[in-house]
């Protein structure tokens, strides 16, 4: 599905089980997915669920998935998104977990597109792949490019005066912690699974826990609870086990 942007027209659909399914190709959808990746409160399961809804919309909400079909839909979604984002190459760049945030840097990105391409992102209809190509080509002379340079500058070999300046700039334009820590582990796992024919279901089930009755040991279910709590009554001893949002359980005395 994915090839050179110069030789292949950006796709607006994916093929799942031989059926062509529309995918939300607009750059805003993938930016929202990128923002989900920075949400530290989301479990990996919730991340994938929200991603599927973002990219497939009503089809995902109304479709009855056959065995293995959801896994294929997830693979195609990740394949669509997975081109690496490498904005504004800067000399003397240090190793950095993340040098930009679409949320925190929204105005800088908007201004850079207008300055360099005369594209108004607030009204533009643009495919995600086209957006990424232009995003990767943003000049370090734009304010956004300069900010990336400040954040990624390796100051170890600079003079004391230069170090002072870049430390001030790094502090001024520092990303909030939760915005600078994209869940790279999940991305790497999924990418490796796609490349090597790995088991996507196994990756997505890592956050699932086996819930057992705290009294008799009967397996009750496998669950991923990220918000709220769930009560499950054991069919064997009738004891109620409460699963809380932090994956803790406590025994109820009610029978």
Image: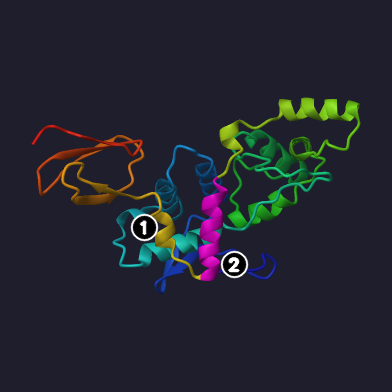
Instruction: Report the span colored magenta.
Output: 183-196
* Callout 2 touching callout 1 (CB < 8 Å): no
Residue 184 is situated, as x and y percent measured from the top left of the image, at: 57, 49
Tag 2, which secondary structure? loop
Q: Which residue is mark 1?
A: 59
Which residue is at 68% across, 70% downward? 7
Quarter of the image where the C terminus is located: top left
The image shows residue 220 at horizontal and vertical percentages of: 20, 50
Q: Nearer the viewer, residue 170 or 18?
A: 170
Residue 197 numbered tag: none
Is residue 118 left or right of 35 when viewed as pictured?
right
Residue placed under numbered mark 2 in the picture: 2
Whether residue 137 is visible here, answered yes or no, is yes
Q: Residue at x 63, y 36 (%)?
A: 106
Q: Earlier in the sequence, mark 2 or mark 1?
A: 2
Res 127 seen here:
no
Quadrant into which the N terminus falls? bottom right
Q: Label 2, label 1: how many angstroms apart (C-alpha)?
A: 22 Å
Q: Nearer the viewer, mark 2 or mark 1?
A: 2
Mark 1 falls on what kind of element? helix
């Amino acid at each position: 599905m994915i090839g050179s942007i110069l030789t292949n027209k950006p796709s607006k659909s994916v093929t799942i089980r031989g059926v062509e399914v529309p995918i939300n190709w607009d750059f805003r959808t993938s930016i929202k997915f990128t923002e989900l990746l920075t949400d530290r409160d989301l479990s990996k399961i919730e991340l994938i669920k929200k991603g599927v809804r973002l990219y497939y919309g009503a089809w995902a909400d109304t479709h009855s998935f056959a065995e293995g079909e959801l896994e294929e839909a997830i693979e195609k979604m990740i394949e669509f998104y997975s081109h690496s984002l490498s904005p504004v190459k800067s000399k003397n760049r240090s190793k950095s977990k993340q040098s930009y945030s679409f949320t925190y840097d929204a105005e800088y990105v908007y201004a850079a597109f207008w300055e360099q391409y005369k594209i108004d992102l607030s009204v533009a209809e643009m495919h995600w792949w086209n957006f990424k190509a232009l995003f990767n080509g943003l000049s370090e002379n734009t304010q956004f490019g300069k900010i990336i340079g400040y954040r990624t500058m390796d100051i170890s070999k600079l003079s004391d005066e230069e170090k002072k300046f870049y430390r001030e700039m790094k502090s001024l334009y520092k990303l909030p912690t939760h915005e600078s820590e994209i869940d790279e582990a999940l991305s790497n796992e999924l990418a490796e699974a796609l490349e090597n024919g790995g088991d996507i279901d196994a990756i997505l089930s890592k956050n699932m826990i086996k819930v057992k009755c705290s009294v008799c040991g009967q397996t009750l279910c496998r669950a991923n609870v990220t918000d709220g709590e769930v009560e499950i009554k054991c069919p064997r001893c009738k004891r109620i086990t409460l699963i809380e949002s932090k994956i803790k359980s406590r025994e109820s005395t009610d029978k």
